[in-house]
Image (spheres, helix red, strand yellow):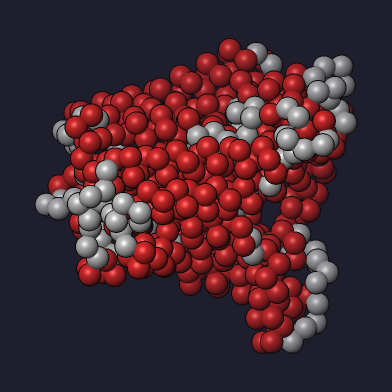
């Protein structure tokens, strides 16, 4: 299938999907209609059969973009979570953690802290943090939407500022292609303090947790959860679980050991697949190995290993019989089916937008033609463009992959005597990519955050959007100051003050109105 150029029509499919999802609050049909609108445009442009061609092109893109490793990882992790749940280990861990973690604030801060700790990969972060913290947040009657927001806001934002992560490797490979820097990892590290959105997003999560701040649709979700007569987990229990007997023999170790095994196996598998113990000496460092690895394959291996550990812990001790273990395995895979379907549709609409209709090239042409004239506001403009492109396509990696070569050339053309503008503009590119990815309903991390927290996907999208916009507005103003002054402390300080003022406003308004959710 040869790509075609359709100009502004290239961004129509994700716009249709997003608008319909927000209106109908039904994500499956919205994504399907978005996909079909894109393949219809492609079919009309290529003079194909309107009926057969539209559907055939959609299925072909779906097959090409389908990532079996990620689907397997999600399914195997769902199986792991379910067998741990059936063994009673989740219940035992929840009871223990509830005695140690006091109140909603403690549960929220623990979730945020764990999100920052798992910085190697955002997929791994989303599902692991949700698996570990969901029983605790349910016990404290924290809305699943709140849990999903914290997971999402500490996944990509921490990965994009961690020098050893799959994201750092992706950025480094794109920087290497520009041949503009002596050290690609040095250039990446230089962008970290200028990545305002990632830093502010993480800070905002902790402020929201500490001061218990809720606004927009999130307040309604939190109020309903806190006032519920039953806990969240009882209210949202899957009908298929009505005939499941939760064992009493499960211990805390039955949950903690498999999850720790998952983390250790994932790290070792990434290093192994990256060539850390291979014959090529150039990959015998942590940074080089993580940069050369296949993270999705590593996650499949790690989840398989964790399931084996769970099997050896539960079946020989007769906590679960072999039949019960395999039954739990299948039920766990079934529970992840909706998330896998949303991921598949999200990959497909992203492929239609990027590969068939060439939306990135359309955005790039605008960037190349117009940005040379914006001068001092270049970082702010790049932030907006990167955010829009990432939101439309659902991928941060694809966004900075397209924009990095362009913005480096533009920044060098504007200021050939200094690297400051290049670094600031690169940071704005990465920040905008993460912002769009954070908000987009078709983003992998958004889908996986919903799955990991057990939250309805579209509810997660619209409840976290106001929080992301607050951080983005502060970031935008910070980049305006950065473009004018090239002063890190002044520009980040400006963004930080704006964020704090907005947070303080919502905090004192809640206090005055008496709408604070009790800790």
Q: Which residue is located at x 68 percent, y 47 percent?
A: 294
- The quadrant holding residue 129 is top left
- Report x, y in % for residue 124: 52, 44
Toward the viewer: 398 or 317?
A: 317
Asked if residue 264 lies left or right of residue 22, the reply is right
Q: Residue at x 85, y 22 (%)?
A: 182
In the rendered image, residue 69, in percent from the top left (x then y), is placed at 61, 57
Q: How many labels sit on residues?
A: 0
513 left or right of 351 in image: left
Question: Which quadrant is the N terminus positioned in?
Answer: bottom right
The residue furthest left is: 229
Q: Quadrant location of the C terminus? A: top left
- Asked whether the viewer can see residue 429, the reply is no
Which residue is depicted at the point 69% across and 87% down?
A: 52
Q: Is residue 323 above or below residue 379?
A: below
Name the one closer to the observer, 213 or 362.
213
Q: Please state if 268 lies on the left or on the right of 29 as rendered.
A: right
Q: Would residue 430 appear left or right of 465 to someone viewing this image?
A: right
Front one among 447 and 302: 302
Query: Residue at (63%, 34%) from the top-left corner?
Result: 165
Front-most of residues 473 and 302 = 302
Query: Percent from the top left, x then y, of residue 162?
Result: 60, 28
- For residue 489, which quarter of the picture? top right
**Residue 279 on image: x %, y %:** 82, 36
Observer able to see residue 290: yes
């Amino acid at each position: 299938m040869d790509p075609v150029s359709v100009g502004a029509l290239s961004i129509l499919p994700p716009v249709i999907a997003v608008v319909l999802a927000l209106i109908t609050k039904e994500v499956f049909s919205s994504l399907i209609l978005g996909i079909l609108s894109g393949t219809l445009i492609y079919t009309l442009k290529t003079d194909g059969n309107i009926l057969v061609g539209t559907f055939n092109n959609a299925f072909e893109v779906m097959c090409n973009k389908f990532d079996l490793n990620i689907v397997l990882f999600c399914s195997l992790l769902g199986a792991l979570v379910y067998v741990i749940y059936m063994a009673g280990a989740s219940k035992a861990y929840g009871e223990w953690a509830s005695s140690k973690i006091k109140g909603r604030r403690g549960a929220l801060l623990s979730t945020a802290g764990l999100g920052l700790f798992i910085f190697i990969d955002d997929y791994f972060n989303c599902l692991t943090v949700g698996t570990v913290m969901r029983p605790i947040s349910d016990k404290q009657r924290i809305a699943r939407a709140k849990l999903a927001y914290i997971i999402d806001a500490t996944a990509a934002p921490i990965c994009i500022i961690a020098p050893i992560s799959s994201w750092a490797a992706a950025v480094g490979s794109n920087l290497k292609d520009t041949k503009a820097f002596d050290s690609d990892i040095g250039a990446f590290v230089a962008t970290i303090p200028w990545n305002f959105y990632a830093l502010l997003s993480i800070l905002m999560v902790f402020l929201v947790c500490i001061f218990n701040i809720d606004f927009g649709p999130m307040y309604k979700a939190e109020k309903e959860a806190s006032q519920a007569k039953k806990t969240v987990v009882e209210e949202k229990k899957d009908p298929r679980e009505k005939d499941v007997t939760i064992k009493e023999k499960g211990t805390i170790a039955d949950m903690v050991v498999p999850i720790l095994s998952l983390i250790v196996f994932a790290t070792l598998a990434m290093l192994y697949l990256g060539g850390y113990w291979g014959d090529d000496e150039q990959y015998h460092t942590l940074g080089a190995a993580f940069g050369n690895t296949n993270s999705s394959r590593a996650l499949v291996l790690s989840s398989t290993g964790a399931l084996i550990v769970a099997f050896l812990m539960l079946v020989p001790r007769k906590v679960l019989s072999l039949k019960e273990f395999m039954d739990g395995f299948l039920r766990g895979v079934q529970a992840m089916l909706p998330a896998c379907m949303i991921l598949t549709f999200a990959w497909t609409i992203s492929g239609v937008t990027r590969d068939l209709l060439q939306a990135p090239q359309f955005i790039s042409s605008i960037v190349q033609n117009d940005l040379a004239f914006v001068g001092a506001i270049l970082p702010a403009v790049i932030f907006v463009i990167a955010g829009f492109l990432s939101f439309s396509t659902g991928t941060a990696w694809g966004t900075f992959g397209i924009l990095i070569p362009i913005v480096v050339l533009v920044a060098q053309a504007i200021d050939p005597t200094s690297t400051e503008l290049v670094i600031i503009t690169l940071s704005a590119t990465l920040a905008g990519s993460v912002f769009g990815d954070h908000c987009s309903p078709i983003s992998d991390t958004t889908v996986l955050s919903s799955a990991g927290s057990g939250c309805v996907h579209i509810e997660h999208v619209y409840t976290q959007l106001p929080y992301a916009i607050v951080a983005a507005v502060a970031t935008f103003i910070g980049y305006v100051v950065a473009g004018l002054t090239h002063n890190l402390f002044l520009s980040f300080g400006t963004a930080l003050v704006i964020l704090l003022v907005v947070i303080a406003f919502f905090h004192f308004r809640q206090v005055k109105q008496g709408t604070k959710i009790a800790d």
